Image: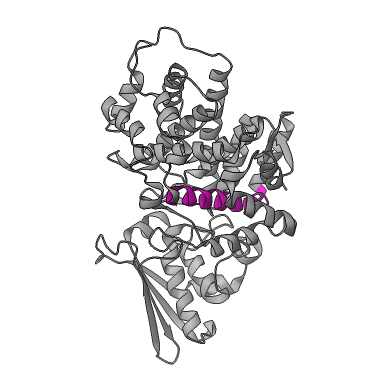
Amino acid sequence: MPSLNYSLSYIQEHIPFVNLPNDVVEAAKQCMLNASAAGLAGASQPASVSISNFIQNMGSIGKCTLIGMGVRTSPIYAAFGNSFIINILDYNEEISKSHDSVSAVIFPIVMSLGEIHGYTGQEVLRAYILGIEYCLQLLDKTEERQSQDFMKCAALGGILAASILLNFDDNQFETSLYITSNSIVTKSDFSTIQERSYLYGQCSMNVMTTALSIQNGFTISDLENDSFTMFLRSLGLGPQDHQNIIQSLSTVPLLHSDGLALKLYPCPSASHECIEAILLLLQQYNIDHFEISSVQIKVPHRTIRECNLNPPLSESQSKTSLPFIVASTIIYGQPLIEQFTKPFFELELVHDFMKKITITENTSLTSSNFRTSEVVIKFNNGEEISNIVDFARGTAVLPLDQTELEAKFLYCSRYILPPDHIEGAISQITNLQDIADITGLVSILGG
């Protein structure tokens, strides 16, 4: 196989953990804590239980843990299951520009491999960071940031992370890139959160299958075509671009500067500015929702594109329905996981209030306020109040602090982990670089 200068040895020799910027390391640990929280909350969802039952029925025996399920399985099934579980509530992090979750693909891979081999926290954290940076660098250089490009880039980030942990040589790494680039399940859009979660799980599982196959001696003889080069061209990249990415993984970090937004609410982030505008009004005024005559919402095009502007027809649609999110927030306050369950979906109070809501697109936005949402509430007595929010908390502009993130972890894990395990998991992830063996941490997350 001809050398394409996609050298893993360069990464292993020139980018040790100590060369990773401190702000990137801290951001990565926050993302891992956030992914763990999302997974623990997602484990209780019916779809996650179905996936867990499927995995158990396959009779797979292994050392890898399904988050929140108390189930051990093979690394391949763990990658699939944990990716699905982390993503199912739409409560995980997202890339600021493409609105997808890198951790949903890469986090299950590094944690499963870490659990199998007893890797140190530093080893797992380094692979996770470099895998995410590789994905972000690839995605940043593509001309279109659609979900199809994201899945390709996330898979390659996952195979880089796995290759680092398994200490592949350059030939093994190049083979893994070739196989991964030809076996990625992609789709440009997703009609449901379950569908997206399933495809994320498939992506993570495919990466793990490739990595373990190559670790066990699988090779492709006479690889003389330029398939991976052609794949790069499909992303608008060339071999030199890829070599530059490899060499700049630690010197041009995007994880902290470009930002992974950590979600404060378990619903699409495109609705979060609208939510915060309402919450600020609720804090400022003593609002009785029975006295409201109408609610006018102005949102950016992104919200129009990513949220459902109609009342939900099912419980699963309630999470993406902006009228439902607005009505629920006005009536019950900050959106919580419980507000998107069947009992809340069936409340006539919420459905009746949705009839008062009008949503229009704000066409006057610029590149500096591209997320701005405006809420105008009119009362039966003719009075009117309004609020505008440019950026919600949790975005890269207003990131969650450690206290808020720990509070989210506590909320998501309170029914699954005992208090001492919650405290222990937070402490171990926060100090992950000092953990001698992550097996104990992953076992705690299993519930």
Quadrant where the N terminus sits is top left
In the image, taking residue 419 as reference, residue 167 lies left or right, namely: left
Q: Is residue 36 magenta?
A: yes
Across the whole image, how many numbered discs are drawn on residues?
Answer: 0
Instruction: Name, please, the residue furthest toward the top.
Output: 222
In the image, taking residue 2 as reference, residue 64 lies left or right, namely: right
Residue 96 makes an appearance in the image: no
Magenta stretch: dominant secondary structure: helix
Identified at 53% across, 41% down, the residue is 125
Residue 98 placement (x, y as % from top left): 38, 48
Identified at 43% across, 31% down, the residue is 156
Image quadrant where residue 73 sits:
top right
Instruction: Name, please, the residue furthest toward the front.
Output: 18
Residue 289 placement (x, y as % from top left): 53, 82
Identified at 59% across, 65% down, the residue is 336
Compared with 112, 420 (above or below) is below
Compared with 143, 207 (above or below) is above
Residue 302 placement (x, y as % from top left): 35, 57
Q: Specify start and end residues of the magenta stretch as a single range.
A: 23-46
Image quadrant where residue 379 sits:
bottom left
Residue closer to the observer: 417 or 268: 417
Residue closer to the observer: 352 or 7: 7
Residue 404 placement (x, y as % from top left): 54, 64
Residue closer to the observer: 255 or 56: 255
Compared with 8, 299 (above or below) is below
Q: Is residue 142 magenta?
A: no
